Image (cartoon, rainbow, N blue to C red):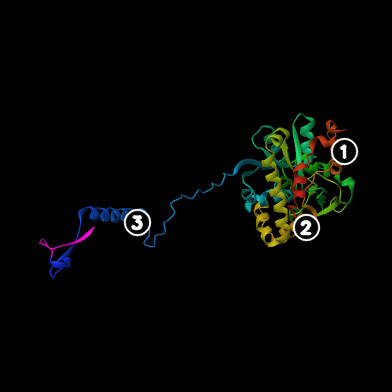
């Protein structure tokens, strides 16, 4: 309530005289003060002079799941293993939620032993080693096939004149029971070791493929049998897992196979970007040899969808049976699983 007061009697007529002042009674003053304090509190807690409140709801960020760790190995330094190596180097595995530890275990037999011994979950190696392991009691299967035709040529020194020259000579293979043995019998352990043994004249003849053939040609070796030109079926390089792991980790396996398909598509579109990755994998600096290897493997051999179909497996089984009777008559459908590649194909992952 507002009233006039000058601490004296009101003048006549109740009108204020000069020198008087207006007073606010204490009850009203308290209410005004309370309102002012309340306004200050509101402003101090996030209010604004315009009267529009500032939101105080906390943002809820969705955490990115940690990538799944996978131990994988490849059994030889060969262009046939380029897809998983490329997927690792270019971050494709990681983009698909996999933290893949990809290591070299030199020799398909050793890589298979690591798989069966649970040292790795996935191995990149040949189908012949897979069939041999299966008939030996290994619960293994192939889920991809990158090289469905043999890339091998059998090479011998320039002095070679015919099959009789092989009598009494050492013919090398990369690994016992491996795909190079089907192509060619002294086991050297790996493709790199085989090439080195031939260059050192420790092995008279043996199978080869780019880029190793470039060094052999320069050293005077020549082709005496060309399986590549004949398009001989092969199961040269595959993704191998135990059936138990595949059944218990289907999501991981699908991501892994998806990554390989994406790697093949990317490589086919980008030769300049692929050559440095190939150089790192093969430890080869000869750019002509690398270019030749790309043109052969990436352009001509690697399928976008690396299906595992029975035809090539049956052919390789029959060839392997000549040196390993245990695989004779093997039902190859028991060692192949095409579901992961088919799933990627159904989703048109490769375009």
In the rendered structure, find residue 43 and report the number of the disc placed on it.
3
Instruction: Give the quarter of the image for residue 246.
Output: top right
Contact between labelled residues 3 and 2, with CB atoms less than 8 Å apart: no
The structure residue drawn at horizontal position 77% and vertical position 53%, both measured from the top left corner, is 304
Residue extent of the magenta highlight: 1-10
Q: Residues within 10 Å of mark 1 (few under 14, many from 20)?
A: some
Nearest to the observer: residue 204 or residue 251: 251
Q: Residues within 10 Å of mark 2 (few under 14, many from 20)?
A: some
Query: Please, what secondary structure does the residue beneath circle 3 have?
Result: helix
Q: Residue furthest left?
A: 8
Q: Which residue is mark 2?
A: 299
Q: Quadrant of the N terminus?
A: bottom left
Q: Main secondary structure of the magenta part?
A: loop
The structure residue drawn at horizontal position 48% and vertical position 50%, both measured from the top left corner, is 59
Q: Earlier in the sequence, mark 2 or mark 3?
A: 3
Q: Which residue is mark 1?
A: 318
- Please say if 171 is above or below 302: above
Q: Position of residue 255 (x, y in %)?
A: 68, 45
Is 289 within the magenta?
A: no
Q: Residues within 10 Å of mark 3 (few under 14, many from 20)?
A: some
Query: Please, what secondary structure does the residue beneath circle 1 have?
Result: helix
The structure residue drawn at horizontal position 70% and vertical position 50%, both measured from the top left corner, is 83
Nearest to the observer: residue 13 or residue 351: 13
Q: In this rendering, which labeled residue sits more in front, label 3 or label 1?
A: 3
Q: Is residue 184 visible?
A: no
């Amino acid at each position: 309530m507002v009233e006039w007061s000058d601490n004296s009697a009101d003048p006549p007529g109740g009108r204020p005289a000069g020198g008087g002042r207006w007073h606010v009674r204490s009850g009203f003053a308290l209410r005004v003060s309370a309102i002012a304090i309340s306004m200050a509190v509101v402003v101090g807690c996030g209010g604004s002079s315009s009267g529009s409140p500032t939101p105080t709801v906390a943002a809820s960020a969705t955490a990115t799941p940690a990538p799944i760790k996978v131990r994988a190995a490849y059994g030889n330094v060969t262009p046939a293993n380029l897809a998983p190596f490329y997927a690792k180097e270019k971050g494709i595995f990681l983009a698909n939620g996999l933290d893949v530890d990809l290591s070299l275990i030199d020799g398909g037999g050793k890589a298979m032993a690591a798989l069966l011994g649970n040292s790795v979950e996935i191995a990149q190696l040949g189908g012949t080693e897979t069939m041999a392991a299966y008939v030996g009691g290994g619960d293994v299967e192939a889920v991809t096939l990158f090289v469905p035709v043999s890339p091998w040529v059998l090479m011998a020194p320039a002095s070679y004149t015919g099959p009789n020259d092989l009598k009494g000579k050492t013919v090398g293979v990369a690994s016992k029971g491996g795909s190079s043995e089907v192509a060619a019998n002294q086991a050297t352990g790996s493709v790199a070791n085989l090439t080195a043994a031939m260059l050192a004249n420790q092995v008279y003849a043996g199978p080869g493929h780019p880029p190793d053939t470039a060094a052999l040609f320069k050293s005077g070796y020549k082709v005496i049998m060309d399986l590549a030109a004949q398009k001989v079926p092969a199961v040269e390089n595959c993704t191998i897992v135990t059936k138990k792991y595949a059944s218990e980790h289907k999501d991981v396996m699908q991501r892994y196979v998806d990554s390989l398909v994406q790697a093949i598509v990317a490589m086919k579109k980008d030769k300049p970007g692929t050559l440095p990755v190939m150089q790192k994998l093969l430890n080869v600096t000869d750019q002509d040899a690398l270019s030749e290897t790309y043109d052969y493997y990436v352009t001509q051999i690697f399928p976008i969808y690396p299906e595992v179909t029975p035809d090539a497996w049956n052919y390789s089984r029959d060839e392997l049976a000549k040196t390993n009777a245990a695989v004779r008559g093997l039902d190859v459908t028991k060692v192949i699983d095409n579901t992961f590649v088919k799933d990627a194909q159904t989703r048109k992952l490769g375009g």
